[in-house]
Each structure stands twice: as C-alpha cells, then as structure tokens.
Amino acid sequence: MILGRLQGKNRTLALTVGVVIVMTSLSFAAVPFYNWFCRVTGYGGTPQVAAVAPDKILDQTIRIRFDATVEPGMPWVFKPVVRTMDLRIGETGLAYYEAYNPTDRVVAGTASFNVFPGTTGAYFTKMACFCFTQQVLQPGETVQMPVTFFVDPAIVDDPDGKFVREITLSYTFYETPLPEEQAALEPSSAVDAAAVN
C-alpha cells in the first residue's frame, strides 16, 4: 500500500489530499441523492408523481391554495388562474396557471415546485404538470398551463397529516436557455413566427 510507504509530512499530506478528494466527490453526489430522496419521500414539500388517481375518494375535503412567483430577472408575468380550490381527498383536481411574456424576445422557462406544509409532500400527487417540461413563450404570448393532481387518502392515517386542512402548491419560474431550434432563429424570424401564430 502506497500510504504505508510514506513517512511524516508526506503521509499527512497524502491523507489530507485523500480526504479532500473523498469529500468533494461526496458533495457532488449529495445533490442528486437529495433530489431522489425528496421525490421518493415527499421530504421538504416535494410532491409525488403518479399515472393514475386512487380508487378511494373520501368525504373529507381539503383546500388547495395556489401560489406563483418568478425568480429575479425572469421577465414573465406568472399567476394562478384561481387562488383556491376545495376538493375531496382522493379526488382529481385540475388547476391552471397563466404565464405572459411581455418582452419582444422568445423566453424559455422551467418551474420548480413544492407544497406547504412540507409534511404533505408525501401525499400531494401530480398526474400531469407543466412543470415537468420546459415552457417557451413567444414575444407577447400568454398561455394557460394545467396541473392535474390529487391528495392521497393515506394522509388521514398520518399523525400530522390528518390535521391538515389546507395545502399550498407553489411554483417559481426560472429563465432557462432556449432549445437549440429556438436559439438558432434570428430575432426577426422569431417575432415573425409569433405574429403568424
């Protein structure tokens, strides 16, 4: 073993460099692991994703509040179409958010999301969402973007979740680089394309 052959300061230096390399490697692995952990457990208010709604719908209702923000520098105007919705636990809900690009350029954005209180992330489940893909708005374009969701009936069996009467679904839009085909367009071509549509 190489470390066994090193003496004194060289051995200490080799150990220090080794610790730095291991810690740096772990820090890079921590982000994807944390994202995976949040998606699986709902930790930190990360909603779940499902292909189908539950079979059981309870008589108990819960209020869903919708929130929308944009990061500093993102030029879009972004808001929920309705601010609140009451639905039965297990029932599928459909809500819309509206985005408007007031600029004279094509702007792409991606939404990050979470729910509050954070303990409800394991039970708030999306079936379809605009946040799953990048959105591209032409100059002056307004779009309404849907999100389909339900609150899992298992929430009533959770010691903390059974007392929740309201969940806030929050989105923040961030500007992202344009897709290659959009970025390749000349600015005048993009405006002309928007006028045709």
Image: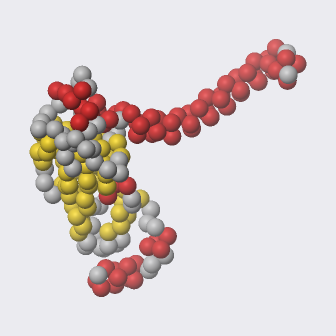
Tell me the colour scheme of the image. secondary structure
Q: Quadrant of residue 40?
A: top left
Q: Residue furthest right?
A: 5
118 left or right of 133? left
Classify the position of the N terminus by image quarter: top right
Q: Residue furthest front?
A: 55
Q: Nearer the viewer, residue 34 or 105?
A: 34
Establish if 129 lies above or below 121.
Answer: below
Q: Nearer the viewer, residue 111 or 121?
A: 121
Which residue: 26% across, 53% down? Answer: 148
Judge whether residue 79 can be spotted in this image.
Answer: no
Residue 91 picture location, percent across and down: 19, 46
Which residue: 31% across, 55% down? Answer: 129
188 left or right of 7? left
Q: Residue furthest top?
A: 8
Residue 69 picture location, percent across and down: 25, 50
Q: Quadrant of residue 195?
A: bottom left
Which residue: 15% across, 57% down? Answer: 81
Establish if 47 lies above or below 78.
Answer: above
164 left or right of 171? left
Which residue: 30% across, 85% down? Answer: 196
Classify the position of the C terminus by image quarter: bottom left
Residue 146 picture location, percent across and down: 25, 59
